[in-house]
Image (cartoon, rainbow, N blue to C red):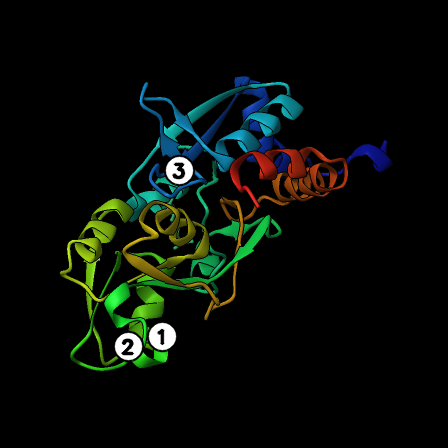
Amino acid sequence: TFLYAADNSLWEKSTLNQILKRGELRVGLESGYKPFEMTAKNGEIIGFDVDLAKVMAKAMGVKLKIVNTAWDGIIPALITDKFDIIMSGMTITQKRNLQVNFADPYIIVGQTLLIHKKDAGKIKSYKDLNNPKYVIASKLGTTGYFAAKKYIPKAKVNAFETEADAFQDFINGKADAFVYDLPLCAYYYSLYKDRVVFLDKPFTFEPLGWAIKKGDPDFLNWLNNFLRQIKGDGTYDRIYKKWFKS
Ligand code: ARG
């Protein structure tokens, strides 16, 4: 009848419908942003995002496939359907949001700094680094790199393909500061407390969200309601506590 003649082609095309038909959720991420996604000694990719992805796949009643992808091409890979969703600690930026849609933020972070102990008196905030004599290390294509360029324009920025390489540059003394999302700086600080100072007051505001292809209201609706549910029923807190001690 007329009442039931609604066009369901949107749902036919929805990524969510594809996932259910396939029986598999394909999650794109780039391992290396601790504790969101990292590679364990046995080669398995683990972390906060991975545990959330597991709960998500379970709620959909499908299997989970993790697709490890270089950060550099992660948005193009989503758009060309190499996976269904990016769950990779990605900051919801206005620029990225022109290319992809984001579910509601699942955590808020911001940029922080690690500096060498010898500079503790001289460098008290990112503003003190805004001088051509300083070198900053970060990772290419991340909000850490963008923030360094935008807020510390006079400093030289060394950009690397991975978080680990950027941190190595800093800890080896080739850079005066490492700029990155608070959780990763906190992790490195815990390992190098004797050598580095953590300027842990974020100087940017960064909601992180799961990214999906544009034009998919059904998937977006499911994700936002899933997130609200796990935040309300204790699931999110349990997983959070597992990866973020404090
Ligand atoms: N939040 C930062 C950004 O969106 C860094 C994310 C890096 N994530 C990763 N899995 N390597 O640019």
Q: Earlier in the sequence, mark 2 or mark 3?
A: 3
Q: Earlier in the sequence, mark 1 or mark 3?
A: 3
Whole-angstrom CA distance, mark 2 to mark 3, is: 31 Å
Residue under pointer 3? 29
Please determine whether, in this image, residue 221 is positioned above or below residue 112.
above
Residue type of the residue flagged with mark 3: Leu
Q: Nearer the viewer, residue 77 or 225?
A: 225
Q: Residue at x 62, y 51 (%)?
A: 104
Q: Residues within 10 Å of mark 3 (few under 14, many from 20)?
A: many
Q: Secondary structure at mark 1?
A: helix
Residue type of the residue flagged with mark 2: Leu
Q: Residues within 10 Å of mark 2 (few under 14, many from 20)?
A: many
Percent position of residue 206, x then y: 50, 61
Q: Residue at x 48, y 67 (%)?
A: 201
Q: Secondary structure at mark 3?
A: strand
Q: Nearer the viewer, mark 2 or mark 3?
A: 2
The label shown at residue 129 is: 2
> Which residue, as the protein is rendered here, is positioned at the far front?
194
Q: Residue at x 53, y 49 (%)?
A: 209
Percent position of residue 229, x then y: 74, 38
The label shown at residue 178 is: none
Whole-angstrom CA distance, mark 1 to mark 3, is: 29 Å
Whole-angstrom CA distance, mark 2 to mark 1, is: 5 Å
Whether disc 3's CB lies below 8 Å from ligand 1 is answered: yes
Residue under pointer 1? 126
